[in-house]
Amino acid sequence: MSGIESINARRRPIVRLGVFLISHSLIVSVICCIAAILALLLLPVLAKSTYVSENALMPGSANTMLSNQEVSEADRLVKDVNALSLESVDAGINIAKLIARYMADLGAEVCYHKFRRQQNQFNPLHFFLSTDPVVVQRNISCSSFGVNTVGVIRAPRGDGKEAIVLVTPYNSSRIDAAEASSLGIGYSIFSLLSQVTWLAKDIIWLAADSRFGVYAPVASWLKDYHTPLFSGLGQVNAGVCHESNDLLKLKDAMVSDTNISKIFTRAGTMAAALVVKVVDRHNEADEDTLSIFAEASNGQMPNLDLINIVNYLAVHRQGLRVKVEKFWSLLDSKFLNFVGETVELLGKVAKSLNPNWRFGMPVAEYVEGTATLASSLFNQALGVPTGPHGAFRDYQVDAITLEISPKGSLKSMGQRIDFLMRGGRLVEAVVWSVNNLLEKFHQSFFLYLLTSPSKFVSVGIYMIAFALLIAPLPIVAASLCSDANRRDSSLSKEGSSQPHASADEPNPTLKSWRWLHAAKSVFVIHFWSSLVTLLPHFISKMPSGTSASSLLIWLSLCILSLFLLYTILGSPFSHITTSRPQEWAILKSVTVSAAFIGLCLMSVINFATAEIGALLIVPMCLIACPLKLDLQDWSFRALIRAASNLTLVLIAFPPATFYLLKGGIEGSDSVSVGNFWNWLETLWAWNSATYLYIGMVHLPCWVLCLNILLHPR
Amino acid sequence: TMSDPEILNKKNKKLDFWIWGIASIIFRIILIYFPKNLNLSSRPEVSTPLTNLRRLAEGYWLKQSSISPYAGSMYHGSPLLLSMLGPLTVKKIEGQPNNLLCSLIFVNADFVAALLIRATGHYLQTAYDRSLELLGISTPLGRSEALPSGEIAALVYLWNPLTIVTCLGSSTAPIENLVVILTLCGACAGLAPLAAFGWVMATHFSLYPVILIIPVVLLLGFGPDAPPRKLFIQKKFGKVGMDLSSDKSLKHKEVTTLRVSPMHFSWVNIFHFLFWACLWSIYVLLLCGISLKDYGGLSEMFRRTYGFILCVEDLSPNIGVLWYFFAEVFEFFRGFFLIVFHVNILFMILPLAIRLNHRPCFLAFVYVAISSMLKSYPSVGDAALYLGLLGLFVNELAGKLDILTNAGDMHFSFFLFCGYVGVFLLSPVMHNLWIWRGTGNANFYFATAITYACFQIILVVESVSAMLNHDRFLRKLSTTTTTTAGIS
């Protein structure tokens, strides 16, 4: 004993701390997990108010210049568009022509951008290889193409190297009043900006044809914008689609109108992009509301400054009510209300102790903040962009969607003009602000979660919860490893009294290299999981099949391939020898390390996924212990452990998690078997890293935990 | 005398080696057909400005159009490599991936390197067995139970993901690694001309292997790795002191066996080596001179290859630590810090050579690891090389011989493994975050680089201390055997 103490005394403090943590791994992990969940619940309290950190932006420093003249012009456009849509069922190209004419009348450079509908493809490596040019699809159907109309105003004070993009999506096959008024807002700004002298960045107005969804036109325009092919529309047309009726019309339009450029018009690099969308909710709201959508693919967010200025201008200048998405169902949650009350109480106590401590917040605010935070976390975790702004983020352009909904009806002219004026002034002020920028947005945060339009949690704070959650993993791995080694060496010391005992072992020990076997089985499972991740690619190519049948095929293939791999490469149970009782501990140690690495990686790629995943994986990994041991023990603690093990493994099985969550949120009758498959399909169609996470981190970890539970010793 | 099952077992193991070796080749060839999907050649971890094949193709193209291949700071490799691989980069076979021929050459280079590692392992193992026998040390398990380190090292080299990635990533690193291994193999086998050839070529290709001259000289002088020399002296004098009365013939035998033992330094081999090294370098320089006759000659070559390496001209990010530092440092101090960084490697050479002089091959491993940590344009190919060499010492480092005391056991092996896996997965993600997404910055990527450097340091420190522990253990064992021999 004294020998150990003397060794400890000689060690450096940091090593001693490490040894202390490892030897008390159980208590450390319990404390860390509880602290992590507390930190997560406290995030809304720790949120800071947003502030504009880039001085050059100066939001609201100038008075808006949008006047009645531009707005009434815009209203004329809205009326024309509405008339066109009433005229024929499929107004199609006529609307594009109309917009182009209006643009050209303002003296802007106009061009059409034709794009084809593109099937989103499953490309698991997309995340790392975003530089690759996208493979052109071979089977193009001639009917499925859309036409964007692009107008560019050259800045009088600019050098043509930078641009601000306005996007107004409209559905050309079925345009409604709301979409028409979003075109109206776009036009009012555009006409104003074509006259002003202060513009230092070019303005691009993209009237995006959203008949194939709002994302596709913007994405394909951006792709063409950034891929200098130098081919005009004529060359694109030279393909197979000569007979297409609409295309002929388009050609006619181009030939007849000399103002419309035949080549793809470009401006400079994009400083920012605003997607303006009008939604007529016919709702009860007593004021115009503005919803901000910011999540791009894989949880990327635009620079916080952009949201800040929009929020500032909308609230303080235009008097709009600004909202961000939240989970409404969470607002009635009893648990959250309870936590909120506790927080409020704590805040009061803190304030009574020292009036300077500003801790705590009202219950309602807390619950609302949590609901918003949860929605923000969920949208980021999904990795699917929440609007066309997501396409811009892939080119490192900061973009958000402004969804404006009017308080009254858009049918009445007075209200419509008032609404156009408000929306237009907001966009104008934002453009003015962005126009002031000297550099790219870089001052403010890129990694944050919103708890309200004016409050955010930055990466430095939300990382704490995650770090606390995964901190026990390496500690537990080290402690299991060292425990197993110690037991082994004590065993071999006992054996050393009879020197040939150890020689009987079929596989002479390599002491600290014993983890190699466990690492092999972990590798086999990970290899299997990467196969499983690729399988849906082939299953989705099979012609027949509903989503439910595809899911069943997938599951059966998974199980089949797992057993095949076990027979070929050996299962984790194939190396069990009687002399080594701690085999499962080593396996668990390697599993936990693999989970740790996976979670760390994912936290860099998409923090929100890692956070939600860690909430599932970490407890499962930490508790995992062979059921046989627990059942042999037959003590209360062992039974509790076995029961919690079983529940966790049931809950963390990816489809089970999905169905439980879906059932919990939307009610149990909305759940059907195929839902999971459909959900995964959207994930991979959007190239979400979450899909890879589920397939290559979560699933193998789950299988390994199952293996540990079923371990014979 | 071996029993039949043992012979059978050995045969099986040999067969296993060939099966796995050939499987690794097939695996590589399959992967060669997916170059677009993997896009490895553009990864900064895989190809450096020195080893990138695309740069080589550019250099070849320049030379074909009668411009100096070094024009425009594209190519920085050897002119010999240019004439060897250059024609292959232009040749395109219809329907086959680009650079198929070069890739096949790299696959071959990997396989030959693995075979050389295996041969080196055999030399090392037989020599080690002999010296243990000389010392009279019998291990608890006996040598027949020892792991076949050559086979293990070769398979580790072949199946190491880093080697595979380097091989597929169109970088010339496999050839550089091959000549380094050739040097060590030649030196272990005592073939001075081969060792000299490998050394000259390796130095010519990438400069850093120049420090391998110390292990090579030690290898040729003393022979392959052996227990500390002091033990042999003790053994000899202990025996002599004890057995004065024993008969002469036995003593004579002892002396003759000790002649081939690590006690004796063979100067002849060294002169042989130096002579051949001179000859080979003159030959290489002559060839280079002919090749660059119209483009500035040898001085241009030295300036553009060694100068480029030593002056760290290219500051594009890689997994090393120098680019970040020299991007930050003021121009005024650049020269000073260049010297500091390079002297860092040189400082470590002598102490290590003194401490590990009885284990020259292990010393070579340590040198390679250190230079891969501190070199100006490191890539994963360097890691592949030293991890392969590490496999040669599996018996010593895994505590295989001293199974009871567990003394020579390498600590933190699992920790290191996890660290390497983590770093090599994290590095591309951080790079993506910085370069493509724009949400991170250079510090993100540099963080992985510095973590990698730390893991390399831990690896070197742990392996060296495990080796020294193993020596201590041998000393203990040898003293007990001599005393027991004396008592009996």
Image (cartoon, rainbow, N blue to C red):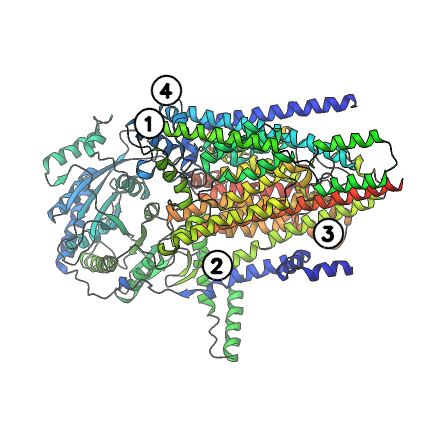
Where residue B166 sits: x, y (%)?
48, 34
Task: Give left or right: position of A283 versus B101.
Answer: left
Instruction: Identify residue for label 4.
Output: B94
Provide residue A534's location: percent of width, then percent of height. 49, 34
Q: Nearer the viewer, residue A338 or B332?
A: B332
Residue A380 can be seen, yes or no: no
> Label for residue A139?
1
User: What label does residue A462 carry, if any?
Assistant: 2
Camera-side mark, 3 or 2: 2
Q: CA distance from mark 2 to mark 1?
A: 46 Å
Q: Are marks 4 and 1 on the same chain?
A: no
Dividing the image into 4 quarters, which one contains the C terminus of chain A? top right
Q: Give the alpha-carbon distance from disc 3 to disc 2, as whole Å.
A: 34 Å
Q: Amino acid at mark 2?
A: Tyr
Q: Amino acid at mark 3?
A: Ala
**Image quarter in which the N terminus of chain A is found:** bottom right
Q: Are marks 3 and 4 on the same chain?
A: no
Relative height, residue A593 to residue B53 (above, below): below
Indicate the chain on which mark 4 is placed: B
Residue A31 in the image: x percent, y percent? 62, 61
Front label number (3 vs 4): 4
The secondary structure type at the circle numbered 2 is helix
Residue at x 47%, y 79% (from the top left corner): A355
Chain bearing tag 3 is A
Q: Is residue A141 left or right of residue B430?
A: left
Circle 3 crowding by C-alpha within 10 Å: few under 14, some 14–19, many from 20: some
Nearer the N terminus, badge 1 or badge 3? Answer: 1
